[in-house]
Amino acid sequence: MTTPGLYRRVVRRETHSSRSGIAIVLAVLLILVFAWIGVEAVLAALKQPALLASPKDAAVTILDAASAPVGLLTAAGAVVAVIGIILIIVALAPGRRGRRSASSDRTAALVDDRVIAQSIAGTASYAGDIEPDQVKVTVGKRSVDVDVTRTSGRTADLRSIQEAVDDELSSYDYSPSLRGKVRLSKEGTVA
Amino acid sequence: MTSTNRFLNRLLVFVVGLVLLLAGGAVAAGALLADVKKNVSQSAKDATQPTSDALSGGQPWILWVTAVAALVLILLLLWFIFRQGRGRTNTLLEVAGGEGKGSPTGGTLTIDAKVAEQVLEESLARDPSIVSVDVSAFEVKKENVLRITAQTRRGVSPIEVRRSIDRAVADWDALLGTATPVVIQITGGLRSQLTGTSRVV
């Protein structure tokens, strides 16, 4: 009954952005532009005064713009082209949402990277016997960086922290999987 | 979990981006090349008179065609916007009444997603590592899928939370008598930022 294909689809869709936000924004902008063009066309056909500019004036202005100064044209074109490039990148990039997945026979699970980071921070501070706010954890695509700030005049037990973090990471079955790296920052804090 | 057509979303973004890139690139490159600029601005000047004649009443059909095309495009875009985010369902399970001797039920049985919601929220509310639970049902690939979103307290192990939810799901399966697909989301939302860290390890 429960198909792995179904879970694969859900996991794939939940770990990547649907791009619906930017798509809806673009659609609304296009609707406004088309609505304006349509209204102006009808007003001009009925020989009524235009809202902003009649189709004739607009077309003539665009044709005239071809003889505008070089610098202005280049700048305007470049700005528009850069916006276009950004949109193309957004359309093609995977758009990961900072989650990872684990599936068992029965259920599929999606875990926020933030939850993983908080859990590892707790593990590290417990293992190294340091305050929780002396540990900063960053979860990347495949790696976990644990930055430990030691208390001034005391040494931090990096090895046991590393072991505890590795222990916890090896109990995870998430994909993409994670590797841990513990670093000691140079400055210490005053206890 | 929704049935949003993601390819269509990306296609719209891509097409708009491509149009902007080509138009902007053509303008910028054309303006920099002196020959091209001279030719284009000359032919634009030549085209000005006929264009303004056509649009100022000489050819009213152009204006009507433009208006209709704009209307059609607007309707398409509205359809595009309103088909986003669908796929939620209120029904979790439907068992049709069988015919003949061996059938278990005489009529159709419908189980609302609300039932699952209340049972699972009730059993997970007792877990101290979970701040809040949200259960809803979605239709994916013609199957009804239950989504359990659990907001965790800061610093709890996601493995433990998963285990506890899996236990609740097993109880629910036993109660229901069948297994519907379940997707678990473990998040650290706003409420988990505001609540304190878990103290007992």
Image (cartoon, rainbow, N blue to C red):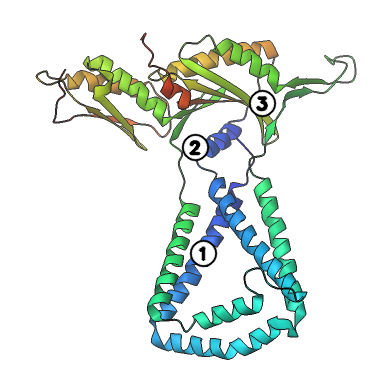
CA separation, marks 3 and 2? Answer: 24 Å
> Could you say which quadrant of the image residue B192 lies in?
top left
What's the residue at 35%, 31% (across, down)? A178
Location of the C terminus of chain B (image quadrant): top left
The residue wearing badge 1 is: B18
Tell me if residue A6 can be seen.
Answer: yes
At label 1, counting other C-alpha atoms closer than 10 Å, the crowd grade (few under 14, some 14-19, many 20 or more) is some
Q: Secondary structure at mark 3?
A: loop
Q: Is residue B168 left or right of residue B156?
A: right
**Which is nearer the eye, A105 or A36?**
A36
**Which is nearer the eye, A90 or B179?**
A90
Circle 3 or circle 1, nearest the eye: 1
**Which is nearer the eye, B135 or A142?**
B135
Please, is residue B144 above or below residue A18 in the view? above
At label 3, counting other C-alpha atoms closer than 10 Å, the crowd grade (few under 14, some 14-19, many 20 or more) is few
The residue wearing badge 2 is: A15
CA separation, marks 2 and 1? Answer: 26 Å
Give amino acid for label 3: Met
Residue B196 rendering spot, x and y as whole percentages:
39, 16
**Which is nearer the eye, A159 or A62?**
A62
Please, is residue B105 above or below residue A57 in the view? above
Location of the N terminus of chain B (image quadrant): top right
Give amino acid for label 1: Leu
Circle 3 or circle 2, nearest the eye: 2
> Could you say which quadrant of the image residue A28 lies in?
bottom right
Have a look at marks 3 and 1 and say if they share a chain.
no
Q: Secondary structure at mark 2?
A: helix
Residue B62 rendering spot, x and y as whole percentages:
73, 77
Instruction: Find out whether the residues at labels 2 and 1 contact each other: C-beta distance under 8 Å.
Output: no
What's the residue at 70%, 35% (across, down)? B142
